[in-house]
Image: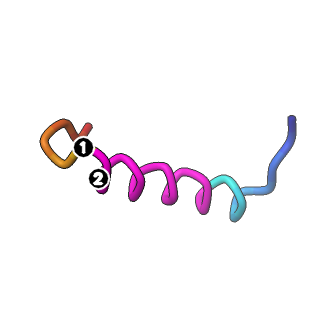
Amino acid sequence: FDMDEDALQYAVGAMVQFAIKSNSKNVF
């Protein structure tokens, strides 16, 4: 499983946005 850095940052950003939207009380 190999990703370039831009794709990795995009995936991390999407996961963070999803976490904030689904549970704004428990953000890391």
Classed neighbour count for the residue bearing mark 2: other residues with Cα under 10 Å, few (<14), some (14–19), many (≥20): some
Residue drawn at (49%, 59%), measured in percent from left and top? 13
Nearer to us in this view, 21 or 27: 21
Q: In this figure, what is the number of numbered marks?
A: 2
Badge 1 is on which residue?
23
Q: Residue furthest toward the front?
A: 22
> Eyeballing the image, is 17 above or below 22?
below
Q: Residue furthest toward the right?
A: 1
- Which residue type does callout 1 highlight? Asn
Quadrant for residue 26, please give it.
Answer: top left
Magenta stretch holds residue 5: no
Classed neighbour count for the residue bearing mark 1: other residues with Cα under 10 Å, few (<14), some (14–19), many (≥20): few
SS of the residue under disc 2: helix
**Disc number placed over residue 1 in the picture, else none:** none
Residue drawn at (49%, 49%), measured in percent from left and top? 15
Range drawn in magenta:
9-22
Q: Where's residue 12, x and y in %? A: 53, 51
Query: What secondary structure characterizes most of the magenta part?
Result: helix
Residue drawn at (19%, 48%), measured in percent from left and top? 24
Contact (CB < 8 A) between labels 1 and 2? yes
Badge 2 is on which residue?
20
Q: Is residue 5 left or right of residue 15?
A: right
Q: Is residue 28 left or right of residue 6?
A: left
How far is the residue under mark 1 from the one under mark 2?
5 Å
Residue drawn at (60%, 62%), measured in percent from left and top? 10
SS of the residue under disc 1: loop
- Which residue type does callout 2 highlight? Ile
Q: Residue furthest toward the left?
A: 25
> Eyeballing the image, is 28 above or below 18?
above
Dividing the image into 4 quarters, which one contains the N terminus?
top right
